[in-house]
Amino acid sequence: VGIVVASGGNAGLANAYAATEVGVPATVFVPETAPAVKVMKLWASGANVVQRGAEYSEAYDAAVAYAAETGAVYCHAYDQPEIAAGAGTIGTELLEQLGEVDTVVVAVGGGGLMAGVAAAVEGRAKVVGVESETTPTLHAALAAGTPVDVAVSGIAADSLGARQIGRIGFEVAVRTGVRAVLVSDEDIVAARSLLWEQYRIIVEHGAATAFAALHSGAYVPADGERVAVILCGANTDPATV
């Protein structure tokens, strides 16, 4: 029966890879709006790909129903301790490679990457969580004091398109004092273009969201502040850069 996961594409690729490594089948539910490049990579990875709904939450509901019907093991894209901890190894490696860092800037959707990184660097660096103005899951949760639903739209919604931040992400953000910063679609597009034009780095819009906080001035570091930006996600069509 294997595993099943709902994803905008990236978490699905990670789960499909892991499933292949241990020799079990993987079924990945993605929205019908998932970028073609991600769907193609999922099929190429050997996963069974099912497209359902217009956004992640609808693909998630379908995946949960599939798991209940088939007995497949459900792997959450972000709100699961093992998944967040795995993403958090980025924070551990970052500290090992760079030594002293004051601030880590990371994009936020469902909050798994942010939670893992914030836990990994807790006590050694602060974390700034950056999200689109059109899908502000962390910002809305911090304002409400609990995870709440938000509308899902915008250019980065294919990878940062959760309707609500995960419970793990919210609790870690509160515990570690993660600061939420919002950027516009225009900021994200400009940041993505600059990463290519100046640094020859191709990323998807979700990854560029983190850099957009610095490029747009939404987050302004203090003099001498040592800042690391995590660019996570390059499953995109280079022709769109």
Image: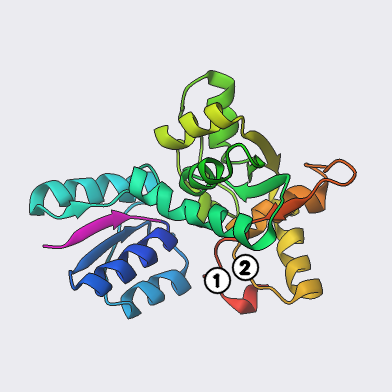
> Is the residue under label 1 in contact with that under label 2 (CB below 8 Å)?
yes
Report which residue position mark 1 lands on.
236
Is 81 left, or right, of 67 in this rendering? right
Which class describes the residues within 10 Å of circle 1: few (<14), some (14-19), or many (20+)? some
Residue 219 visible somewhere in the drawing: yes
User: What residue lies at 50% left-to-right and 42% top-to-bottom?
Assistant: 115
Q: Nearer the viewer, residue 191 or 210?
A: 210
Residues shaded magenta:
1-7
Q: What distance separates the C-alpha of mark 2 from that of mark 1?
A: 7 Å
Label 2 secondary element: loop
**Residue 221: image x %, image y %?**
82, 43
How many numbered discs? 2
Residue 166 appears in the picture as rendered = no
Residue that numbered label 2 is attached to:
203
Callout 2 amino acid? Val
Lower position in the chain sequence, tag 2 or tag 1: 2
Which residue is situated farthest in the top direction here? 145
Percent of width and height locating residue 160: 52, 50
Q: Residue at x 67, y 48 (%)?
A: 105
The residue under label 1 is which amino acid type? Thr
Q: Is residue 167 above or below residue 46?
A: above
In this picture, residue 76 sits left or right of residue 222:
left
Residue 208 horizontal/vertical position (percent): 66, 59
Quarter of the rendering occupied by the N terminus = bottom left
Foreground residue among 156 and 209: 209
Considering the image in quadrants, where does the C terminus appear?
bottom right
